[in-house]
Image (cartoon, grey):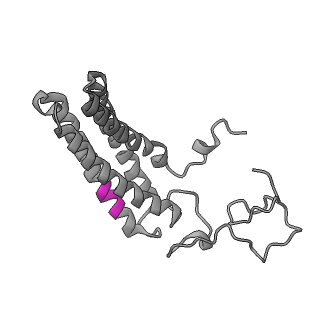
Amino acid sequence: MDFLPGMNNAVNLHPMFVHFPIVLVLLSLLSEIIFLISKTEFFGKAAGILLNFAAVSAIVAMYFGYRAADILGHDSPAHDQVHVHRDIMLWFTWLTVLFAIIFQFIKQVRKGIFRFIALLILSVILVIGADRGAELVFRYGMGVSSPPEDMILTSPRHDLHEEDDTDDDDDEPDSHPSQPHSHNNQHDH
């Protein structure tokens, strides 16, 4: 039995790191909002620290994103969408780094509404870029071990958990765990 089966079977490490900048930027925005409302210095400092960590984690996620794109190659499905996701997240990463440096070293812009506006801009770009990344995973199966052909979607589908009339009750419960299947108590989760 693997100690960390998810990590040991990961196609690439990008999914392991992308969540850090997402959470850190959104927490920084939340801290900044609380700071602006309450004027409690702790939340202002927390917003700055979280933004700094977000910048570092965004660079790490970007590095593993480039590695993931290299692994997937140019012949992978939805390769053009990979470029769209990459371009949006490059803007996010470099703006995060730029804002972190500005707010770290220029005290005049640290107070007031400037950091809130910067964090709001970052959050909007982040949501759009993360959505494109989610589309690559959930719609096209990118970044996961080679999905079956019928799982690579070219248009949105909502029938992945509907009853499959071709299933035979004599099949072993977990004989096709990566295939879409119904949840009719054939196996335990």
Q: Residue at x 34, y 63 (%)?
A: 83
Q: Residue furthest left?
A: 108
Q: What's drawn in magenta, residue-wise? A: 84-89
Q: Looking at the image, is 77 positioned above or below residue 51?
A: below
Q: Looking at the image, is 3 positioned above or below residue 155?
A: above
Q: Residue at x 37, y 52 (%)?
A: 66
Give the x, y percent position of residue 171.
85, 66
Residue 166 visible = yes
Q: In the shown orientation, is residue 183 left or right of residue 50?
A: right
The quarter in which the N terminus is drawn is: top right
Residue 132 on the magenta segment: no
Q: Main secondary structure of the magenta part?
A: helix
Give the x, y percent position of residue 181.
72, 65
Q: In the shown orientation, is residue 148 left or right of residue 15?
A: right
Q: Residue furthest right?
A: 170
Q: Residue at x 51, y 66 (%)?
A: 139
Quadrant location of residue 21? Answer: top left
Quadrant location of residue 97? Answer: top left
Give the x, y percent position of residue 77.
47, 70
Give the x, y percent position of residue 105.
15, 28
Q: In the shown orientation, is residue 70 left or right of residue 148?
A: left
Nearest the camera: 84 or 63? Answer: 84
Total numbered badges shown on the rendered structure: 0
Quadrant location of residue 55? Answer: top left
Q: Residue at x 16, y 39 (%)?
A: 114
